[in-house]
Image: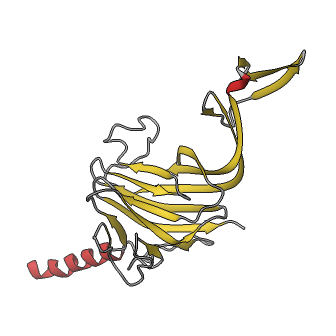
Amino acid sequence: MRLALVPLAILAVALTTRAGDDFKPEPGYVSLFNGKDLAGWKYGKETDLAGKTETADKRFRVADGIIVAEEGKGIKDLYTVKAFNTEFNLKLEFRAALKADSGVYIRGPQLQVRDFIRRGEMKGKLTKFKNDGWNELDITVKNGVVTTTVNGKALTEKDSLALSVENGKPIAMLNGKSVDINKIECSVGAVARCLCNGELMENMKIPQKSGQGIGLQAETGKFEFRRIRVKEMP
């Protein structure tokens, strides 16, 4: 009976090990992580980690088709060698240990990625978040986006802002209510629309261009990343 169970145990381990490698990006997407080593990524003075399965300080390592970010002294960042200045869609999955804290960098600014529910953050916003499970980030970057804020709050597609001039004086109405025109700001730039499991996290303002690639952060607790792929727009 024990001998019969051994092959099944070996098969289970093999399937678990291959799970990260079996994934294939959707048509049009390019994988940024080959599941075997850190080729295409850089870390501090280590400008290209091709052939390496861990960084010199072991804060990042590759295991079973996953990039593992370990807790350690200070915040450390792993970046793609390539910068992405065109519009693009980035998809990846992450798994957070208990109350772990990490991040994903898009052209410099950081999207906070954490063990949200058990840290007591974003309550009622990420209803599909999975504790100890894989969660998908879906980040769409658009250039030349017009952003309008009133009292420091960005307007959404549900808001209606009307501007007019009466007796030489400008008048502003937001959703039918008068607002101080001095508290209205408009800007044109790049925006990263960030979803977690299909739910909106935030619309993050980012630079139009940057020499930085896409980055992963190692900070508090253990964090895991996999299935990192990108589709660049023409």
Q: Nearer the viewer, residue 149 or 132?
A: 149
Quadrant of the drawing holding the C terminus: bottom right
Q: Residue 134 placed where, x, y %? A: 38, 57
Q: Residue 52 placed where, x, y %? A: 35, 81
* Residue appearing at x 55%, y 62% in the figure: 90
Q: Is residue 196 visible?
A: yes
Looking at the image, which residue sits at the far front? Answer: 45
* Residue appearing at x 89%, y 18% in the figure: 168
User: Relative to 97, does residue 127 appear above or below in the rendering?
Assistant: above
Residue 100 falls left or right of residue 3:
right
Looking at the image, which residue sits at the far bottom? Answer: 51
* Image coloring type: secondary structure
Quadrant of the drawing holding the N terminus: bottom left
Looking at the image, which residue sits at the far top? Answer: 167
Q: Residue 70 placed where, x, y %? A: 28, 62
User: Relative to 167, does residue 81 appear above or below in the rendering?
Assistant: below
Q: How many numbered tags mark residues here? A: 0
Within the image, what quadrant is residue 174 found in?
A: top right
User: Relative to 76, does residue 117 appear above or below in the rendering?
Assistant: above
Residue 74 falls left or right of residue 186:
left
Residue 55 falls left or right of residue 31:
left
* Residue appearing at x 43%, y 38% in the figure: 122
Q: Nearer the viewer, residue 111 or 183?
A: 183
Looking at the image, which residue sits at the far left? Answer: 2
Q: Nearer the viewer, residue 89 or 214?
A: 214
Q: Residue 88 placed where, x, y %? A: 63, 62
Q: Nearer the viewer, residue 139 or 51?
A: 51
Q: Is residue 1 visible?
A: no
User: Relative to 147, does residue 166 appear above or below in the rendering?
Assistant: above
